[in-house]
Amino acid sequence: MMLKKQAVVLGCMLAGAASVARAVEPATLAAIDLHVSAIESKMIGWRRDIHQHPELSNQEYRTAALVAAHLRKLGLEVTTGVGGTGVVGVLKGKTPGKVVALRADMDALPVKEMVDLPFASKAKGKHMGKEIDVMHACGHDGHTAILMATAEVLAGMRDQIHGTVKFIFQPAEEGRSEVPHSEDEHIGARAMIDAGVLDNPKVDAVFGLHLIPGYSVGTIGYRPGAILASGDTFAIKVSGKQTHGGFPWNGIDPIVSAAQIVMGLQTVVSRQLNLTKEAAVISIGSIHGGNRENIIPENVELLGTVRTFDNQMRDDTLRRMRITAESIAQASGAKAEVHFLKPSYLATVNDANLSDQMLPTMKQIAGQKAILVPKSSASEDFSEFQQKVPGLFFFLGATDPKKDAATAAPNHSPKFEIDEASLAIGTRAMTALALDFLSLP
């Protein structure tokens, strides 16, 4: 079965290569394919090991140790503990040149696995002080294995590298699993950037990918410009004055104010934002207040999320939300306190020039299955790297082509799973993109 899939993928590669300008030499592509095929079973083994031993954000000690040991065996310069549990490997090519960074995230999610696999997770972890089931429900185990394999392939092709490759294994992409030490504490990509991951040597461009069950194996989904939304979590505390439900005039009802705020926030999108520029979403996911039918409570708390595809539009949206909530509460004598919680995520925006330059290589790898994908309202802190250097983030199809990708369990589902044939495609893509970028004048 695996050999048949490889043959299909290789056929797509050759068909795609014939229809586009070659950004990577055919001999180089053939060498990449041989290297990847030689280590594919080993890569699958890494993925299964990591899947069976998932670790939550900033707790990726075992995974980080596995990665670091592998990079050292390859002869790379290795730094550990970067931005928490992050690992960075540096591979210097035969000749000096530009520096390209390749990034993979390592953390798992507080989800109980419901997939019947021989290497299914039975792990537990501490999430916000509570013991909870842990699972790689977003494919980060695959991302890590792909980048480990890419490091091995490129180390074996060192003489063809004109420049430097920096491998970034990042913790805590999924957000916090522990109470922060301070409100301004950075995690994930921000923490690694604070630690200088894009310096010494200075990175010229960064690439990342994400396994997506909504597309079949062999698919590379690309999009210049915004591909993923910003993500902000907000909490609104509405304070009133407690009183008997039969005498509401003796108090200030925060439930009514909260209801008006929920509706008012929807007008921020529908009536205050220029939606011809980009889409935006404001959703309330949690409302808590009161404990008895005939007592008007003192406080009501709202919890929600904001998604936008333009970072200036995001800032404007957050400002308008604060004004709207505070003003509505004030009109009834109540008080609204609006807090935007950390970590927040900026929109993931692919550099237009870099996307255009790399498109021929993506088409060489995926052929007709290199497709322009719509924007997704999910969020990713890969966006933090893109704030500093040009970056390209793309989707990697993860569902068996014999199955309906439209009905596959999505990322973050307890039934999330991937077809492991996708790992080889990801390694080919990351390797070819690195070599392509380093060959640019």
Image (spheres, rainbow, N blue to C red):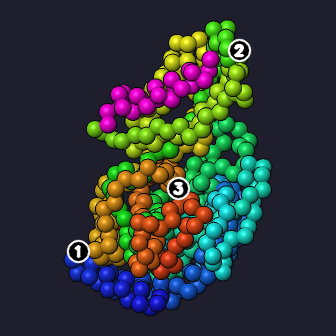
Disc 2 and disc 1: Cα gap in Å? Answer: 72 Å
Q: Main secondary structure of the magenta part?
A: helix
Q: Is residue 261 above or below residue 314?
A: above
- Residue 317 lies, in percent from the top left, at 44, 32
For discs 1 and 3, the disc positioned in front in the rendered view: 1
The secondary structure type at the circle numbered 3 is: loop
Disc 3 and disc 2: Cα gap in Å? Answer: 57 Å
Q: Which residue is mark 1?
A: 20
Indicate which disc, 3 or 2, sits on the residue closer to the N terminus: 3
For discs 2 and 1, the disc positioned in front in the rendered view: 2
The secondary structure type at the circle numbered 1 is: loop
Q: Which residue is mark 2?
A: 243
CA neighbours of label 1 inside 10 A, class few (<14), some (14 to 19), many (20+): some
* In the foreground, 142 or 136: 136
Task: Please tell me in which quadrant of the rendered image residue 256 appears.
Answer: top right
- Asked if the magenta segment contains residue 397, the reply would be no
* In the foreground, 409 or 4: 409
In the image, the segment drawn in magenta is 253-275
- Disc 1 marks a residue whose amino acid type is Val
- Identified at 63% across, 76% down, the residue is 116
Q: Which residue is mark 3?
A: 198
User: Is residue 269 in view?
Assistant: yes
The secondary structure type at the circle numbered 2 is: strand
Determine whether, in the image, residue 75 is placed left or right of residue 11.
right
- Disc 3 marks a residue whose amino acid type is Leu
Indicate which disc, 2 or 1, sits on the residue closer to the N terminus: 1
Disc 1 and disc 3: Cα gap in Å? Answer: 32 Å
* In the foreground, 129 or 41: 129
- Identified at 59% across, 54% down, the residue is 174
* In the foreground, 68 or 235: 235
